[in-house]
Amino acid sequence: MQEPIDIVYLWVDGNHPGFREERDKYATEARDRDPARYRDNLDLLKYSLRGLSKYLPWVRNIYIVTCRPQRPAWLARNERIRLIYHDQFIEQSVLPLYNSNSIFCFLNQIPELSRRFIYCEDDILWTAPTSLSHFVDSDGRLRIHQRFGYTPDADAQFDESALLVNPTWAYNNGLLDAAFGRHRRPTHTHAPLLVDIEFWNELVRRWPAEIAATKANRFRSPNDVVPVYLYRHFLLNTGRAKVVSRWKTYIEAHYHGLEYLRPWIWIGLNLINVMRPKTTCLNDNWGEAPPVAITAMIQRFLERRFATKSPFEVDDGELPSAEIVRNGEAFPL
């Protein structure tokens, strides 16, 4: 690896004192308060870093993006960790933000971030050895993992009778249709994304007003640009990405929704050991109340599957450092 590659996680703890009260000052819709978007009851980021330490030793720095003053209680002092608060790289006029689409649009402004970085949501685990070739092919094109099924066509955003799971897909397809022609576009699996800042800046220059509007959306909105979706299709349509087979998608990038049915959870967890995918997304679909017994089962599995602590965790009984000093400047931890 001659080129440094960093990784960026978005993380939040909805149970942090005062977080809900501050959020609810601005929330206007029930979806804005959806606890699944802010829940951290499984400590998945901790296990993701355990997998990262084991399977991706070539990653340079680890950026954990969150809102002030949150910090994972288990996070240790480590020179590779960069805990970055929203107010350190996002315009003050739009804060506070509770919209991952909006926050993504500011990531290219993080100081000292590598030109190419891996964007990873905090519910994604690294479950097998992974090299840069997982993200790009031998010609340097981004490898895109597509699932079965299609996102809503652009016309659906104007059809009030259409039952859309997420109307933002139709809005984003409208942008892509106008730029590259009308197509049906498949869904992408939940997986880490290698982002090239130069390519992202090119995308911003193509849709400046839409990106600006998304940056200002405090909560998710039907007129959000979905960066991970638009970026993939932008590179596909400009010849800088290729689609891998759906078979490889399900082998390499495992996705499992966390539901209330215990056998379903058992199957999904055991498929990790059987298929040995590069990544696994455990997506929280529990709503208000996660089931206690199933939560405990998942936690036992995670402790067995990722038994070795990473260098990024405090030792038992050790208190985390409040800050780390680099080149004379204090950074929060």
Image: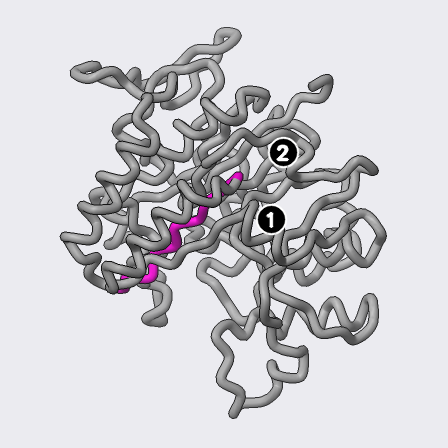
- Residue drawn at x 49%, y 18% as measured from the top left: 80
Q: Is residue 304 above or below residue 323?
A: below
Quadrant hosting residue 115: top right
Indicate the position of residue 255 as horizontal and vertical percent values.
46, 53
* Label 2 Cα neighbours within 10 Å, binned few <14 / some 14-19 / many ≥20: many
Q: Residue at x 23, y 63 (%)?
A: 288
| Left or right side of 262 for 130 | right
Q: Give the vertical position of 112 relative to 104 (above or below).
A: above
Magenta span = 278-287
Residue at the (60%, 81%) spot, across then down: 157
Hey, which residue is sitting farthest top in the picture?
Answer: 328
Would residue 282 be counted in the magenta stretch?
yes
State the image coordinates of residue 280 (x, y, percent, origin top left): 45, 45
Asked if marks 2 and 1 touch (Cβ < 8 Å), the reply is no
Is 139 positioned to the left or the right of 90 in the image? Answer: right
- Which percent across, then down, holds residue 121? 47, 45
SS majority, magenta: strand
The percent coordinates of residue 226 (x first, y second) are: 59, 59
Residue shown at 36%/33% (left/top)? 47
**Residue position for label 2:** 117
Q: CA distance from mark 2 to mark 1?
A: 14 Å
Which residue is the site of mark 1? 105
Please tell me which of labels 2 and 1 falls first in the chain.
Answer: 1
Instruction: Looking at this view, name the residue that lies furthest to the front.
Output: 274
Q: Is residue 215 visible?
A: yes
Is the C terminus in the top left, top right, bottom left or bottom right quadrant?
Answer: top left
Q: Amino acid at mark 1?
A: Cys
